[in-house]
Image (cartoon, helix red, strand yellow):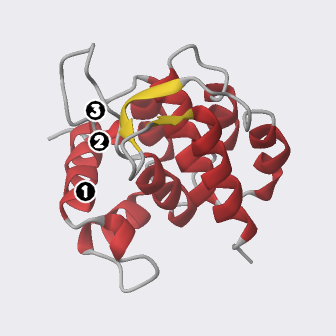
Amino acid sequence: MDRMEIVRELLRECHRNQLSSVIPPPYPEALTKLKQMRPEKELLQLYEQRDPVVLCTIEYDPKKIRYEGGSEWGMLARELNLNIFSYLIADLHNKDVRIQAFACEALGDLGNKAAVPILKRLLNDNRTVPGWSNADGSKCTIGQFANHAIEHLSHRH
């Protein structure tokens, strides 16, 4: 198994262990192994390629894909000191609202408050994100994703 496949498998294991529910320590074994490997190059390449293991896609039909892993990606990047901030900021301007929503979630959990002024520009963006709904059944908007990220960042120390 080459290094990229090892990184993919460790990411899958992190997803199976529901990474977001176990940070801070104790870390699952897969996250510990990723920290030891320092796979920044591979992780950035997987992100740039929109690899499903990073985006945590739950549908493989391109018209129905819902990207689930924004928060998890942000936490993982934070834990691994992955230099992903500029990629996520660029993705706030992606034409695909699903990528924008993913970037908002990731930025909220990455913890870099420099994202707040950029996220604020999206607060009035009423474009809906396919596959996402609020508790009342209304569709989630990019503005709501941005607001959630800002709230999350405001509670970080």
Is 6 situated left or right of 110 in this image?
left
Which element type, helix, strand or loop, lies under badge 2? loop
Left or right: residue 35 compared with residue 103:
left
Q: Earlier in the sequence, mark 1 or mark 2?
A: 1
* Quadrant into which the N terminus falls: top left
Q: Identify which residue, 117 or 112, lies in the foreground.
A: 117
Quick one: SS at disc 1?
Answer: helix
- Judging by the rendered image, the residue that carries numbered circle 2 is 56
Q: Is residue 92 shown left or right of residue 54?
A: right
For the residues labelled 1 and 2, say whether their Cβ atoms are less than 8 Å apart.
yes
As drawn, the label of residue 15 is 1
In space, the residues marked 3 and 1 are separated at their CA atoms by: 12 Å
**Is residue 84 visible from the viewing direction of this image?**
no
SS label for mark 3: helix
Amino acid on which the number 3 mark rests in the picture: Pro
Q: Quadrant of residue 138?
A: top left
Q: Residue at x 63, y 33 (%)?
A: 87
**Residue 81, quarter of picture:** bottom right
Dot 3 corresponds to which residue? 52
Q: Which mark is residue 4?
A: none
Between discs 3 and 1, the one toward the N terminus = 1
